[in-house]
Image (spheres, grey):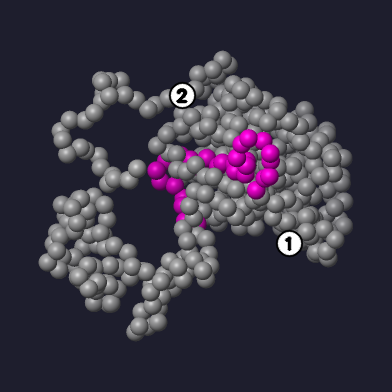
């Protein structure tokens, strides 16, 4: 089907209603299921009794060990956090009904919730995260085909469907050669929402390759040797102002308007930035040397999981590619902003946020995740895949990357970390 011009009104005065009164036509939906709690009950959930186990000076960042729901409730009473988080990224369990181990076969976490129990588990946390998010903040929720479509409806309810920005499809692995009667499962999804229409946004770009640049910018300006492409000087939608008026004896095409006022177009033409075809059709010259790159779209092919890209990892299961987090953090936050990940796992979000000079809060209820994160802060990531057997230098980090955070735990779980903290201090002493 060919795509038509975007319009808000029919040329005719009547609109088709498919035999339904307009008052009955609505796209507002929400999930109904047994065990769905009232928002007020979630916002007043019992807070975690959190203890500070170790603190650097200054302890700008925070790593919490424990169930993230009561810990998030605790943060609601923190004036330095509530309404101050610029970016949230979470990679929660996917309702796979599985138990995950590290590469060294240590138990990492279980993913046994399913159905309505899983939906409510995520919804309760999303409601608390919404309260922590800054008015100009963003949230990214990473899921797969099991529950992403349900959680999309939940996020419409929690954050408002008008604050939905993107359904990002990520290529997670290399092609599969399964013999079953389905297409290869090589993608997962990231739901991107904001808290309002005004949000931090630093547009992401992919670098031009020589092949793509030559194909996209196929013309060369004789006078300067600059490579350029031709684009229309009009845009969809009629306008009654200056951009809808005549320019150089011509009106914009029906249903369209000039992208610039006639005065601006004259100035562009005087600078040689307008290309005139043999039949007098104007086009704007867009130069390659003024391009920041290819604007990122909502299909991401370059951030496959670690074991598919031979990058260095910690060995924690379902660990995400650091470059994936780099794109998200750079796009939706600025230096010194606060980034939160309450399913922090191996600490990839925290590590990348620190490298990009953001502040962070991490939460996880797996002792193995906390141990992996602490070890990562000292030793960095380890080689795997094609790196194994090669002489690869282990990453080392400046001391501030290791010491500028506080380690917290639920009161019930703090004793479990006693030995872990001793080991971590020994790691620091050895490095």
Answer whether residue 310 is visible to the viewer in this image.
yes
Residue at figure coordinates x 60%, y 31% from the top left: 146
- Tell which of 3 and 331 is nearer to you: 3
Q: Which residue is mark 2?
A: 30
Q: Residues within 10 Å of mark 2 (few under 14, many from 20)?
A: few
Q: Is 402 inside the magenta-drawn segment?
A: no
How many numbered badges does the structure rendering display?
2
Q: Which residue is mark 1?
A: 398
The magenta-colored residue range is 175-204
Q: Residue at x 79, y 50 (%)?
A: 375
Residue 281, x across and y down, in percent = 22, 67
Looking at the image, is 221 positioned above or below residue 400?
below
Query: Of residues 337 and 178, which is closer to you in this image?
Result: 178
Q: Earlier in the sequence, mark 2 or mark 1?
A: 2
Q: Quadrant of the N terminus?
A: top left
> For the view shown, which residue lies furthest in the top direction?
34
Quadrant of the rendered image containing residue 220: bottom left
């Amino acid at each position: 089907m060919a795509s038509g011009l975007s319009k808000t009104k029919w040329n005719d005065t009547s609109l088709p209603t498919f035999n339904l009164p307009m008052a009955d036509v609505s796209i507002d939906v929400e999930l109904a299921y047994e065990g769905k709690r009232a928002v007020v009950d979630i916002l007043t959930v019992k807070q975690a009794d959190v203890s500070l186990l170790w603190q650097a000076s200054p302890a700008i960042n925070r790593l919490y060990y424990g169930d993230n729901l009561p810990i998030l409730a605790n943060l609601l009473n923190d004036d330095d956090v509530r309404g101050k988080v610029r970016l949230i990224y979470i990679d929660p369990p996917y309702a796979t009904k599985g138990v995950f181990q590290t590469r060294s076969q240590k138990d990492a976490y279980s993913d046994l919730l399913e159905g309505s129990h899983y939906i409510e588990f995520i919804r309760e946390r999303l409601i608390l995260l919404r309260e922590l998010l800054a008015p100009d903040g963003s949230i990214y929720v990473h899921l797969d085909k099991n529950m992403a479509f349900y959680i999309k409806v939940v996020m419409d309810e929690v954050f408002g469907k008008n604050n939905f920005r993107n359904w990002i499809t990520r290529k997670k692995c290399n092609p599969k050669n399964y013999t079953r009667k389905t297409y290869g499962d090589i993608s997962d999804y990231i739901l991107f929402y904001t808290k309002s229409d005004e949000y931090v946004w630093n547009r992401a770009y992919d670098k031009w390759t020589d092949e793509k640049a030559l194909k996209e910018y196929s013309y060369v300006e004789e006078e300067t040797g600059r490579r350029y492409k031709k684009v229309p000087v009009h845009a969809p939608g009629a306008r009654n102002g200056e951009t809808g008026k005549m320019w150089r004896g011509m009106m914009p095409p029906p249903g369209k308007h000039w992208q610039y006022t006639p005065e601006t177009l004259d100035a562009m033409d005087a600078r040689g930035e307008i290309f005139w075809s043999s039949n007098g059709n104007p086009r704007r010259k867009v130069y390659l040397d003024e391009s920041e790159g290819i604007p990122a779209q909502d299909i991401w092919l370059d951030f496959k999981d670690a074991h598919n890209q031979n990058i260095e990892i910690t060995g924690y299961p379902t660990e995400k590619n650091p470059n994936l987090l780099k794109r998200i953090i750079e796009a939706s936050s600025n230096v010194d902003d606060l980034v939160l990940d309450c399913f922090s796992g191996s600490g990839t979000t925290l590590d990348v946020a620190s490298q990009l000079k953001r502040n962070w809060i991490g939460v996880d209820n797996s002792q193995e995740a906390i141990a992996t994160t602490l070890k990562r802060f000292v030793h960095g990531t380890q080689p795997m895949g094609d790196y194994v057997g090669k002489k690869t230098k282990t990453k080392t980090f400046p001391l501030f990357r290791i010491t500028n955070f506080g380690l917290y735990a639920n009161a019930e779980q703090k004793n479990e970390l006693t030995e872990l903290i001793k080991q971590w201090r020994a790691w620091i002493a050895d490095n």
